Each structure stands twice: as structure tokens, then as C-alpha cells.
């Protein structure tokens, strides 16, 4: 009995040592998450309830900032422009990424090279890519007018026509991230066991049947990930709107992220800018829940 009793303190010390060792390993990650994620979120939530301009101390105004959004025409315009951009980008990158993954999942010569070509735009600096597309869209000496003349296409002024400017930015977004989501879908396709396809073939399922009843259902988690990450990325679009069109013409490309930046750093309305950030988080949270309900994936 004495021997058994003496083992417990020893085991307890060993377990405590392991716990402290594990905590030491994860502590840097916890601190990083707390400092760069938790603290900014809580600070933005607190500032959204204040009137704050960096000059005078924050003044508590309650939900006034959120009420002001309802009558702020620039904010409403930014929401509409952002929704247009999201609608233009997310379905396109989902479809293009999925079709490219189906193509590059097949065996053919040079497959790895073509994968790299389609993925390359994603690793290019977004600032550098924005300036390249600014040159492409230039109405006088850009590549698009020359391309349109060569193939007798409509000469669209992507930079100065408020009707088409936001769709010009959407093209940049589609060009940049389609290859990234191609790789995500490709990873999902290659994670599907070939045993399912072999069993379906034995049962007489054709190519379309295997795709519809095996590939699509097993890709639901991947589809959910692409939709969520793609929507968040499109909702946070900023650099092309700032560098290519600077929100113009007449606010037709002023997305929410750009309006938030202008409100906070140009007009020094940090309380109102924080309220806009909280609004964006709420919208993305609701959208994520809707995606999960729509695709019916257990997460």
C-alpha cells in the first residue's frame, strides 16, 4: 500500500512536467493569436461604440455608428459595389477552379507545367499585378484596346466607365485566384479513394454516374472551404480598387474595404471605421453559416 501511495506523487509530477512542456511549445502560438487576432477584434468592437479620431479621447456613443450606416449613402454604395464584386468573382473562381482541377487531374504530358502556369498569378504580388492590369486597361496605349481592335471586340473603357469598372476589377480577381482554388479542388479530387470508382465501375456506373454520385458528394467539404475562403477574400478586396481605379469613377469601384480605409485613415473617423469592420465580420459570419446549411456538411 505504501509503494502504491508513493507512485501517485511521482506520476503527478510527471504529468505536470508534460503539461508545462506542452504549454511551453504552444505558448508562442497562443500569444501570437491573442496579440494579432483577439486583441484587434476586441479593440475594433470597443471602438465601434465610440467616436474616436486619434486627437481627442474616445467618446462613447453606443450604437450610433451602426445607425449612421443606414443613412450613409457612401456606405450603402460601398456595400452594393462589394456585392457586385463578390457575385462576379466567387462563382467564376469556383467554376473555373473546379473545371481546371478536373482537367489537371487527368494524365497528359506537361501537366505539371500547366499547373504551375495557372497557379503562378496567385504568387505574384497583388500590388505588382494591379499595376500590370492598370497598363492593360489603359484606354490609349493599353493592351486591351489593341486586343479589341485586333479581334473587333467592343472597346470598353475599363477604368473610366462606371458601368464596367467593377467588372474589370472582378476580372483581375478571377485571373489571380482561380489557379489557387484549382489546387484546392485538385487536392480534394486526389483524396477520393480509387476504390469507390472501381466498385462503381463493377456495378455498371458510367463516367457521369461516377462523377455525380461519388466525386461531387465526396467533394462537399472542399466546395464548402472554397466558397467560404473565396467569399471572404472577395469581400476583403482592396488593392485593385485602390491602385487601379482609386474607387472611381464616381465611387463605382469603392468596395467596403477601401471605404473603411478612407474613413479611418483619410477622415480619421476610427470609431465609424471600426463599426464598418464589425459589420463586415457579421456579414461574413452569417454567409458562412448559410454556406454550411446549403451544402450540408458536418463541420
Image (cartoon, helix red, strand yellow):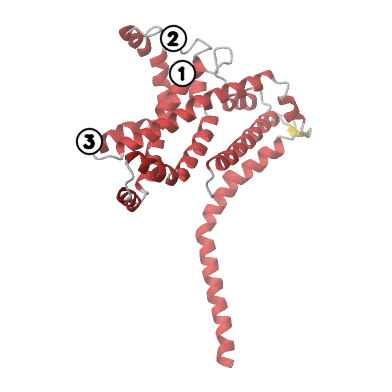
Q: Mark 1 near mark 3, Cβ–Cβ under 8 Å?
A: no
Of residues 55 and 93, the one drawn nearer to the viewer in this rendering: 93
Dot placed on the residue nearer the N-terminal end, 1 or 3: 3
Q: Name the disc covering residue 168, or none.
A: 1
Name the residue tied to disc 2: 156
Dot placed on the residue nearer the N-terminal end, 1 or 2: 2
Q: Mark 1 near mark 2, Cβ–Cβ under 8 Å?
A: yes
Q: Is residue 150 above or below residue 77?
A: above
Image point (63%, 45%), residue name: 39
Q: Name the disc covering residue 103, or none.
A: none
Residue 295 appears in the figure:
yes
| Residue 240 pos. (x, y %) | 48, 23
Name the residue tied to disc 3: 110
Q: Residues within 10 Å of mark 2 (few under 14, many from 20)?
A: some
| Residue 287 pos. (x, y %) | 59, 36
Dot placed on the residue nearer the N-terminal end, 2 or 3: 3
Q: Mark 2 near mark 3, Cβ–Cβ under 8 Å?
A: no
Question: Tag 1's secondary structure?
Answer: helix
Alpha carbon distance from label 1 to label 2 = 10 Å
Question: Tag 3's secondary structure?
Answer: loop
Of residues 221 and 245, the one drawn nearer to the viewer in this rendering: 221
- Give residue 176's quadrant in the image: top left
Amino acid at each position: 500500500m505504501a509503494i502504491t501511495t508513493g507512485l501517485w506523487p511521482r506520476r503527478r509530477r510527471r504529468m505536470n512536467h508534460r503539461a508545462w512542456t506542452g504549454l511551453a511549445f504552444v505558448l508562442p502560438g497562443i500569444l501570437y493569436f491573442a496579440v494579432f487576432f483577439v486583441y484587434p477584434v476586441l479593440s475594433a468592437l470597443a471602438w465601434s461604440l465610440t467616436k474616436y479620431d486619434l486627437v481627442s479621447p474616445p467618446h462613447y456613443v453606443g450604437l450610433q455608428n451602426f445607425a449612421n450606416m443606414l443613412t450613409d449613402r457612401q456606405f450603402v454604395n460601398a456595400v452594393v459595389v462589394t456585392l457586385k464584386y463578390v457575385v462576379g468573382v466567387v462563382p467564376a473562381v469556383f467554376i473555373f477552379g473546379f473545371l481546371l482541377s478536373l482537367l489537371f487531374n487527368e494524365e497528359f504530358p506537361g501537366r505539371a507545367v500547366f499547373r504551375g502556369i495557372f497557379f503562378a498569378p496567385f504568387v505574384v504580388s497583388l500590388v505588382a499585378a494591379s499595376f500590370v492590369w492598370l497598363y492593360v486597361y489603359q484606354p490609349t496605349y493599353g493592351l486591351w484596346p489593341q486586343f479589341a481592335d485586333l479581334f473587333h471586340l467592343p472597346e470598353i473603357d475599363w477604368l473610366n466607365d462606371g458601368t464596367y469598372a467593377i467588372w474589370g476589377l472582378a476580372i483581375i480577381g478571377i485571373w489571380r485566384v482561380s489557379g489557387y482554388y484549382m489546387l484546392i479542388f485538385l487536392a480534394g479530387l486526389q483524396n477520393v479513394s480509387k476504390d469507390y470508382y472501381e466498385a462503381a465501375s463493377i456495378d455498371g456506373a458510367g463516367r457521369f454516374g461516377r462523377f455525380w454520385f461519388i466525386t461531387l458528394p465526396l467533394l462537399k467539404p472542399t466546395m464548402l472551404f472554397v466558397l467560404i475562403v473565396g467569399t471572404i477574400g472577395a469581400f476583403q478586396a482592396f488593392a485593385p480598387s485602390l491602385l487601379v481605379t482609386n474607387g472611381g469613377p464616381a465611387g463605382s469601384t469603392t468596395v467596403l474595404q477601401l471605404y473603411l480605409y478612407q474613413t479611418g485613415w483619410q477622415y480619421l473617423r476610427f470609431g465609424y471605421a471600426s463599426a464598418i469592420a464589425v459589420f463586415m465580420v457579421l456579414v461574413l459570419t452569417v454567409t458562412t453559416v448559410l454556406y454550411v446549411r446549403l451544402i450540408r456538411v458536418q463541420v
